[in-house]
Image (cartoon, rainbow, N blue to C red):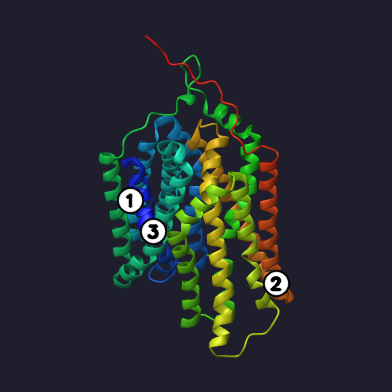
Amino acid sequence: MRGTLAQFRGYERSTRLLMVNQFTINLGFYMLMPYLAAHLAGPLGLAGWLVGLILGVRNFTQQGMFLVGGTLADRLGCKPLIIAGLALRTAGFAMLGLAQSVPALIAASAATGLAGALFNPATRAYLAADAGERRVEAFALFNVFYQAGILLGPLVGMVLTGIDFRITCLTAAGVFAVLGAVQIRALPARAPDDSTARKDGRPQSVAAQWRGILANRPFVLFSLAMTGSYVLSFQVYLALPLEVRRLGGDGDGGTAAVAVLFAVSGLATVLGQTRVTAWCKGRLSPGRALTWGLLTMGVAFAPLLPMTAAPLPESGIVRWLLIAAPPALCALLLALGTMIAYPFEMDTVVRLSGKRLVATHYGLYNTICGIGITVGNLATGAALDASRAAGLSALPWIALLTLGLGCAAAVYGLHRTGRLASPAPAGRAEPITA
């Protein structure tokens, strides 16, 4: 940890602030969101489909508006979008705690989703520009703060929700309000991306910008290839907990085993991310690092296959070891694969953008991956149901393993054909002179 702190202090103040921001954003978000469904279904007494609708609105709004948020960041500057997103998240979380009607809850959920679409691309574009040639290391450290917020948030939320869920909501809203005030005072403003203007000084249309990005074939192919990595990593929240509860039940043992999954994943990243990145950068090209990261994420599901081949003991410590250990090892390998790939992935987006309209590229990248996560989770859920009905419990894990290998092969192909290299620099817009 001393090396991580020393590395943190080596960055500019604005870069350090963005990393602390992400920790605080995740702290506030995860102290509330894991307990929202229980609040909606319990004290508010909403039907299951309404709970799903309210939660789905947040995800749909965020994924659907990433491209818009990135475009606005390039046109207006990153700082205004970061502040606007934090303000909107403040209002949305406060509404979730105080609202009683379904329309108000839907509006609050949409506001929290739109907030993420505003500040996420802007934050990453700002960090990429600020870190310069140290982007890979900066994104590695950024991921440490990101995961630390995910680890701590649910623990804080559990304590607050034990008192009253409204206190959790208002505390989370307060966290975002304070964070927004800090940004106003401490985050330096960055000029809008000058590539949003044409040579005659007039602004380029949004449609023309989007057409240009969609015509960037290497970027689009890379986005599609990396979508699988998000499907795989999301299984820590979907397939692995479902499998643990299927085998271990819904009692305290099953709950503890699920908690181990999250702890293993988060702690591994917090403790190992910067060392893994330093090792990879010293020995691997970005394309090879991405390939190895995806391979590791695919192979992560191999330890689950022996669980499907032999019956579990009826009781005892061996039974719980067999239930908890393979999913925990899977979660650890998924975290390792993400540690290997993530910093190089974020850097590759910047390189493929030609350092132009970076926030818009991040926005489209997040949208493509978000759609992939939705489709992938639907397919994974269907595979889990079908495998249980057919008695083929290995089917989902074989499918996920194959997905990881396929994505690794796709990224390696892009690397070998030179499509992950930086494009030739494009002409910049000429400044207007008096």
Left or right of 415? Residue 15 is: left
Please report whichever mark, 3 or 2, sits nearer to the chain's N-terminal start. Answer: 3
Label 2 is placed on what type of residue? Ala
Residue 232 picture location, percent across and down: 60, 59
Please report whichever mark, 3 or 1, sits nearer to the chain's N-terminal start. Answer: 1
| Residue marked by disc 3 | 149
Label 3 is placed on what type of residue? Gly
Please report whichever mark, 1 or 2, sits nearer to the chain's N-terminal start. Answer: 1
Residue 303 picture location, percent across and down: 63, 71
- Asked if 24 appears above or below 268 in the picture, the reply is above
- Asked if 174 appears above or below 413 in the picture, the reply is below
Q: Nearer the viewer, residue 351 or 40?
A: 351
* Residue at 50% from the left image edge and 76% from the top image edge: 257
Q: Nearer the viewer, residue 200 or 170?
A: 200
Q: Nearer the viewer, residue 223 or 346?
A: 346
Residue at disc 2, secondary structure: loop
Q: In whole angstroms, how far apart are the C-alphas of marks 1 and 2?
A: 44 Å
* Residue at 66% from the left image edge and 37% from the top image edge: 419
| Residue marked by disc 2 | 394
Residue at disc 1, secondary structure: helix
Contact flag, marks 3 and 1 (Cβ < 8 Å): no
Q: Is residue 87 visible?
A: no
Q: In whole angstroms, how far apart are the C-alphas of marks 3 and 2?
A: 33 Å
| Residue marked by disc 1 | 90
Mark 3 vs mark 1: in front: 3
Q: For label 1, count other residues whose C-alpha is less than 10 Å away and answer few (under 14), some (14-19) or many (20+).
A: many
